[in-house]
Amino acid sequence: MSIVTWLLISLLVINTLGAIFTVLRSVRDISTTWAWLLVLLFLPGLGFLIYLFAGRRLSAKKMRLIQAAVAKGSAAFVQLQKRANAHGRLLPTADLTPAAQELINLFLNTARAPVLTNKSVQLYYDGPKKFAALFEDIAKATDYIYVEYYTIYNDALGNQLRDLLIQKAQAGVRVRVLYDAWGSMGASARWWRPLVVAGGQAETYFSSKHLFLDFRLNYRLHRKLVIIDDAIGYIGGFNVGDQYVSRAKKFGFWRDTHLRVMGNTVMALKIQFTSDWNATVSQGQLPYPNRPLAVDQPTSQNAMQIVASGPESSGQQIKAGYVKLITSATKTVWIQTPYLIPDETVYDALMTAALAGIDVRVMIPNMPDHPFIFRATQYYAAQLTAVGVKIYHYQKGFLHAKTMVVDDRLASVGSANLDIRSFKLNFEANAFIYDPTVAHQLTVAFEHDLVESLRLTPKMIAEQSHWLHFKQRFSRLLSPIL
């Protein structure tokens, strides 16, 4: 053999051994391990560059910071629950179904998430109305404004938010902004400088002085929270940018779901933001809230739990909640998600429910925003269709809502998609809702969206090209790391 041949063989052997060592040096689930081996083996050299940015785990130092903040946050949640228990009217039990009580217990045990009631809960389904309400609430703030988003773009809407926050900071309102550096590309520290000059603060979640050497593409801050004056809280799927108010030609109409909450749940949102903020900054940390809860709110109306999950815990709390919701259903499970990449547990729960005669419906977009994720979503949509799950493609625009409604009584709204990334890699936050009135509103919204949707049929799947099937199957192989 020639020198070139020997050199190529040597490089392949080195690449193979390096791939095996790189992947096996960290404990991962088997599907993720095989997915990374596929990337490293079939993309020699390039695969290691991809792994450098997308495959490495959080550093031990950052993991300790997160876990310490989460521990303090959990302690604050426990105290909040004790204050709720001190007023029997605050903890709804008698009026809740056994399924709701079991879900509450699950989150009390896994996430220390207190169940709290509220004076009002408002649902928003389109960006202009949501941001009009948010900006009006911010304009009226007198004490503090805490903002946490995965995406805050440097565009018209993003500048509108930033300029409003600057005005409030200049007026003496405490303004704190937490955002994801990767999700908010363009919203640089320089762009935020006018807010800092005005007296506010804006931080990226786990920013690094050595971005190139320490950059992790995984482990994104995907939560979308706003808390104002201990009175108003927002949680849901909308980010901040022109595309989220339907101004982007690529996506057209943007369909999402967000909650505006007034009541005791605002304290849970504040604790979550405080935990995230204190994990990020070394100076200027925030005290955890400890004010009394309102006792004049209804027993069972608008009750909910704020549940967070992230890679610092192996519990996958939000996924556990999704599975519990699905398995508790007796009539219907209706889901909206932009990405449908379930792991085996969630897939089996959906399949079992459908085969048991439950009306399981999943609504997904009819257009991609990430090509590999879209193809993997198509793959799982076809597989679930084969076992009786009804899949609907939303036609009007881009569907970004992350909702689940079970039996028209229990519901979830938040940032977590029905995909492996949301279960294991991202920092997410969802509201799990025990108010049948709110659940029914989400059911009605789903039914309204059905008019704009096309149901996937076995005939449509059979007519797809061989090339499309190949792309779907290949993307599915990468699904644990997408």
Image (cartoon, rainbow, N blue to C red):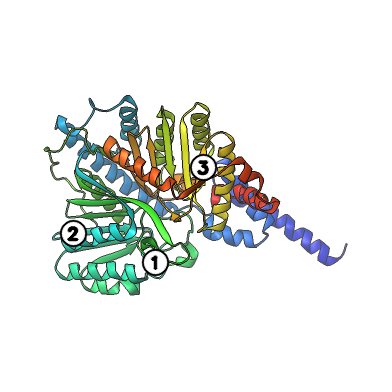
Lower sequence index among marks 3 and 2: 2
- Give above or below for 83 relative to 261: above
Indicate the secondary structure of the residue bearing disc 1: loop
Disc 1 residue type? Arg
Mark 3 residue crowding within 10 angstroms, few (<14) / some (14–19) / many (20+): many
Query: In the depicted view, which residue is nearer to us: 225 or 126?
Result: 126
Disc 2 residue type? Tyr
Q: Is residue 96 found left or right of 394 in the rendered image?
A: left
Q: Is residue 57 found left or right of 266 in the rendered image?
A: right
Q: Quadrant of residue 3?
A: bottom right
Q: Quadrant of residue 462?
A: top right
Please report contact status of discs 2 and 1: CB closer than 8 Å, yes or no.
Answer: no
Q: Quadrant of residue 7?
A: bottom right
Q: Is residue 238 found left or right of 342 in the rendered image?
A: left
- Where residue 283 appears, as percent x and y from the top left, is 26, 61
Disc 3 residue type? Ile
Q: CA distance from mark 3 to mark 2?
A: 43 Å
Identify the residue under disc 1: 247
Indicate the secondary structure of the residue bearing disc 2: strand
Q: CA distance from mark 2 to mark 1?
A: 30 Å
Mark 2 residue crowding within 10 angstroms, few (<14) / some (14–19) / many (20+): some
Name the residue at 15% across, 31% down.
89
Identify the residue under disc 3: 391
- Where residue 238 appears, as percent x and y from the top left, is 36, 56
Query: Which dot marks residue 59?
Result: none
Q: Nearer the viewer, mark 2 or mark 1?
A: 1
Identify the residue under disc 2: 144
- Where residue 21 appears, as percent x and y from the top left, is 63, 50
